[in-house]
């Protein structure tokens, strides 16, 4: 060891190289994580859009498949009136 400064410089160079390589690896992994995150967000947004489309289609199809309560009440009242008229006619015929 004739020149201790040379040994110190070599050690410092190796340490700096390893630290730089470690930082590069870490930033590479962070970039991969960020890319995966962006891809996941895009997938979730697409799935959310499809779900919203399905819900809109369901909401639009409900009036075609189901009877509203007030429509049923109106129907029931009309049927009661008709049955009352039929009862009255039957009573008049039987007298």
Image: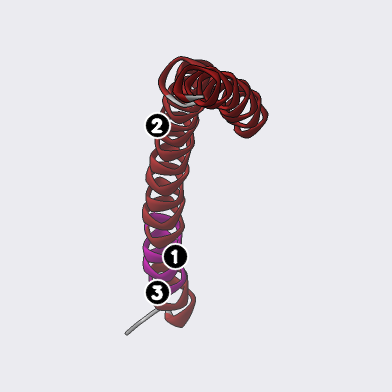
What's the residue at 39%, 61% (across, down)?
22
Q: Could you give the CA–CA distance between mark 2 and mark 1, rounded to whole angstroms?
A: 36 Å
Quarter holding the N terminus?
bottom left
- Which of the marked residues, 2 or 1, is nearer the chain's N terminus? 1
Q: The residue tagged with tag 2: helix, strand or loop?
A: helix
Vertical side of 35 occupied by 87: above or below: above
Q: Which residue is mark 3?
A: 11
Q: Please say whether residue 85 is one of the residues in the magenta stretch.
A: no
What's the residue at 38%, 51% (across, down)?
29
Scheme of colours in the image? secondary structure
Q: Which residue is mark 1?
A: 19
Q: Nearer the viewer, residue 9 or 38?
A: 38
Q: Which residue is mark 2?
A: 43
Query: In terms of secondary structure, what is the magenta stretch mainly?
Result: helix
Q: Could you give the CA–CA distance between mark 3 and mark 2, rounded to whole angstroms?
A: 48 Å
| Percent x, y of residue 47 | 41, 31
For the residues bearing labels 3 and 2, Cβ distance under 8 angstroms: no
For the residues bearing labels 1 and 3, Cβ distance under 8 angstroms: no
Q: Which residues are magenta?
A: 11-21
- Which of the marked residues, 1 or 3, is nearer the chain's N terminus? 3
Vertical side of 29 occupied by 31: above or below: above
Q: Nearer the viewer, mark 2 or mark 1?
A: 2
Left or right of 44: which side holds 92? Answer: right
- Which of the marked residues, 3 or 2, is nearer the chain's N terminus? 3
Q: The residue tagged with tag 3: helix, strand or loop?
A: helix
| Percent x, y of residue 63 | 52, 19
Vertical side of 34 occupied by 48: above or below: above
Q: Could you give the CA–CA distance between mark 1 and mark 3, rounded to whole angstroms?
A: 12 Å
Vertical side of 21 occupied by 63: above or below: above
Q: Nearer the viewer, residue 94 or 37?
A: 94
Q: Nearer the viewer, mark 3 or mark 2?
A: 2
């Amino acid at each position: 060891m004739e020149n201790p400064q040379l040994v110190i410089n070599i050690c410092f160079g190796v340490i700096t190289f390893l630290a730089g390589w470690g930082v590069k690896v870490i930033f590479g992994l962070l970039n991969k994580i960020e890319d995966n995150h962006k891809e996941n967000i895009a997938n979730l947004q697409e799935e959310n859009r499809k779900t919203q489309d399905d819900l809109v289609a369901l909401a639009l199809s409900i009036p075609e498949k189901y009877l509203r309560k007030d429509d049923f009440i109106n129907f029931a009242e009309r049927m009661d009136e008709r049955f009352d008229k039929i009862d009255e006619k039957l009573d008049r015929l039987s007298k």
